[in-house]
Image (cartoon, rainbow, N blue to C red):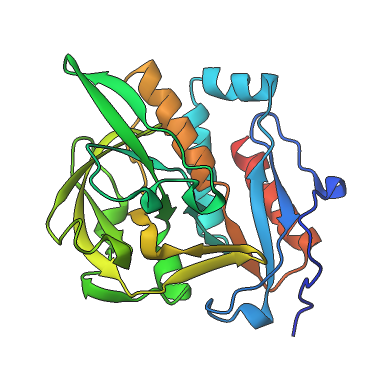
Amino acid sequence: MKKLFYVFFTVQLTVFLIIAELLSFYIYVSVPSFNNIKDFSNHNIYRLTDNFLGEKENELFENKIGFQLLSEFNKEISNSPCFEYYEIDTTNVYIPKFEGDEIFVSGYEHGRPQPSAKISADGNSLELSCIKALHLSENVFSDFNIRLESGRMLNSEDFLYEKDSVLPVILGSSYKGIFKIGDLIDTYNVYGNIRCEVVGFLQKGSSIAISQGRIFYLDRYIILPSFRINRPPQTESEKRAFIYKYLMKNGGIIKSEYDLKTVSEEIARIEKKWG
């Protein structure tokens, strides 16, 4: 059995900081408190994060092929033989004319609910509620033992998003009575305006634990597929949205039987290939 990291900390290990010409990611140690993830006891758990700060971030967004590099990097880490990679993106969604209680608003559990925002759309002013959401890769649903109470699970086709298509979503059990299967929900976030369709409800009490003290209780969450984009951006604003989306996709969880040095070398290899 591989050594588990039972120390309560998340620390940057600068000795394994990986520098590339453009791409720049590094590994954090993550405390494995996964009581519902498959085979966690035989593996080490790490968190991948990026090092795009200041001028380096500006270079990424200004680079003509910045999105392409991030997309290819994502394909490589998602298929690496060295580890299993999970996308768990916590980007909230904004919903107009939301009829649910404040318990669904981001920050509610910490006593700091996010205020609503206003935007102008088609000449009309919309008030948007900031709602808790998780964008998950397909393997999270199977390996974290996520179960439905009703409706259907997301399938592979749901993780490829085409412009102006409807995105299937699953809701936490507390949403029953507010939405029903088949309802359409307009959502807004940094990725743009996406219309979603409710296809299922989670079992009551569902949760995802990604580290000690970092547990998502899903009853009040909207669960979206962490979708792929298989086309180049058409505008500057779309390019920025695509890059941001893939920065979030590339900041996930790694489960591996290998030690930190080996995993870091694998990330460095992929960076060198695409950076």
Where residue 73 sits, quadrant-wise, is top right
Task: State the image coordinates of residue 112 (x, y, percent, origin top left).
Answer: 53, 42
Tally the numbered discs.
0
Quadrant placement of the C terminus: top right
Relative height, residue 158 to residue 203 (above, below):
above
In this orientation, does residue 233 appear? no
Rendered residue at 54%/76% (across/down): 37
Q: Residue at x 56, y 68 (%)?
A: 209
Q: Quadrant of residue 221?
A: bottom left
| Residue 46 image offset from top left, x and y in percent | 68, 61
The image shows residue 143, relative to residue 253, as above or below, that is below
The answer to which of 85 and 96 lies nearer the viewer is 96
261 sits to left or right of 166: right
Asked whether, in this view, residue 93 is left or right of residue 21, the answer is left
Whether residue 80 sits left or right of residue 105 in the image: it is: right
Residue at (65% x, 51% y) in the render: 48
Which residue extends farthest left? 182
Estimate the x, y position of residue 40 in percent, counting from the top left.
62, 78
Residue ID at (45%, 66%): 140
| Residue in front for this viewpoint, 135 or 112 | 112
**Residue at the extreme right:** 15
Task: State which quadrant residue 150 falls in.
Answer: bottom left
Percent across and percent down for residue 216 are: 51, 62
**Residue found farthest to the bottom:** 1
Q: Is residue 170 visible?
A: yes
Image quarter hosting the N terminus: bottom right
